[in-house]
Structure formats: structure tokens, C-alpha cells
Image (cartoon, helix red, strand yellow):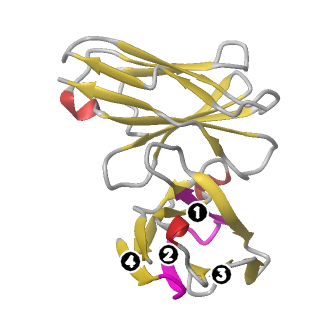
Amino acid sequence: DTGVSQNPRHKITKRGQNVTFRCDPISEHNRLYWYRQTLGQGPEFLTYFQNEAQLEKSRLLSDRFSAERPKGSFSTLEIQRTEQGDSAMYLCASSFGENTGELFFGEGSRLTVL
Amino acid sequence: GENVEQHPSTLSVQEGDSAVIKCTYSDSASNYFPWYKQELGKGPQLIIDIRSNVGEKKDQRIAVTLNKTAKHFSLHITETQPEDSAVYFCAGSGGYNKLIFGAGTRLAVHP
């Protein structure tokens, strides 16, 4: 069990550019979550997948954000036309089962938009 | 939707003392309340959790209590050690399919 893996760990980009983050969950975990964390705050829910289906999206997820989990395994989070306010840590987590339970978090992808 | 408030935002204790962090939640339908510890540069890691059919749960030096009527739950750490220094987050199961986190408590344990 290698845990939840996120890439890249750090990304610095200029405003207006597109960025994509990848998350590889723990194998056999059917649920995958994306959260955003800013300095001094708790993780904020963005979206979650059960297998390949995206079942819920937060109001925080503007139309510049898109997430996919095409085969029910890894997931990508793309941010188009980045803004300085998008600078944050993007955390991916996975879990197993039908009900809310323990989330296993990756170490995050830190985005800095200049 | 669920809203979780956490207090205090910072907590400083001497090694060996106890630490208590408190959270309140808004959604009476929430039924799962975990606590996560986050160390610098790492993702949050579960340390203890409790479901709504239980009032208290203990695991060595840490314990969690839940008062469903008042909609609040607390984390208790006894005999604190320097390695307990971290940021702690409480969460509630808003909507049954996700966790809603509090803003966090930065705990500093001084030798």
C-alpha cells in the first residue's frame, strides 16, 4: 500500500495559464475526493467521485475547474485561466465503502499563481 | 449544509498537561465525526473518530466525546508530548458523502 499519490507537489504558474493536477488513490478505494486548503484554514470540499461518477460538486468549483476520474482509478483536476485567488494546496483523498468513513489524504499539490 | 466551528484556533500547553479542542456542528443529520492531525508539509491523517451512536471513544492518550443534543464534540489529549505539536482538524459528515472540516487548532507542546 503506497498511499495516495499526488503530482506535481508544487506548481508555479502565471495568471491566465492552465494547470492540471493528478491524484492516484489507494488501489481498490472506490471514493475519491478533492479538497482545497489555504493557509490557516481547514480543507474545503471541492468535489467527489464514486468510481468514475462525479456525484457532488461544491459551489466553490467554478466553471474554470474541472475534475475527471475516467476509469475509476486516478483523477485529474484542471484549473483553466488561473487567478491569484486559486493559489492554495489542493488535497486529494480516497476512501472505501458506501458510507462516509476515514479519508486517506495525499500530501497535496501546492499551486502558486503569480 | 453542514457548518463546523472549531475552538481555540491556537493552544499552547506544557509537556505532560492535557489539551482540549472543541467543535460544534450545525447539521443534526451528521453522524460521523473524525479528528485529523496535520503536520507541516503533509496531508491530514485520521487520529480518532466517533459515530453518532456512541458518546465517547478512547484510544490511549486521546479521547473524543460527542453531545448530540448540543451538537458539539471535543478532542482530549492527555499527557501531551512535543510530538503532539501539529494542527488538528475536526470534521462532520455533511450530506453523508463528504467531510466538512473546521478551521483547525494549532497545538504547541512545550518541553
A36 inside magenta stretch: no
Report whether B61 appears left or right of B89: right
At label 3, counting other C-alpha atoms closer than 10 Å, the crowd grade (few under 14, some 14-19, many 20 or more) is: many
- In this rendering, which labeled residue sits more in front, label 4 or label 3? 4
Residue A41 in percent (x, y) is at 36, 54
Give percent across and percent down for residue A23: 58, 24
Q: Secondary structure at mark 1?
A: strand
Point out the stretch of residues depicted in magenta: B15-37
Q: Chain of mark 4?
A: B
Viewport quadrant of the N terminus of chain A: top right
The chain ID associated with circle 2 is: B
Which residue is label 4 attached to? Answer: B11
Q: Looking at the rendered structure, which numbered label has been put on residue B23?
A: 2
Amino acid type, label 2: Cys
Q: CA gap, disc 4 to disc 3?
A: 21 Å
Taking the spot 74% from the left edge, 69% from the top edge, the residue there is B51
Asked whether residue B37 is in view, the answer is: yes
Which amino acid does the dot numbered 4 rest on?
Leu
N-term-proximal mark, 2 vs 4: 4
* 2 vs 4, front mark: 4
Asked whether residue B24 is drawn in magenta, I would say yes
Q: Are marks 3 and 2 in contact (CB under 8 Å)?
A: no
Residue underneath mark 1: B92
Where does label 3 land, which residue?
B66
Quadrant of the rendering where the C terminus of chain A is positioned: top left
Q: Indicate the amino acid at tag 1.
A: Gly
Depicted A100 relative to depicted B105: above or below:
above
- Around disc 1, counting alpha carbons within 10 Å, would you say few (fewer than 14), some (14 to 19), or many (20 or more)? many
CA distance for labels 2 and 4: 14 Å
* Label 4 or label 1, whichever comes before in sequence order: 4
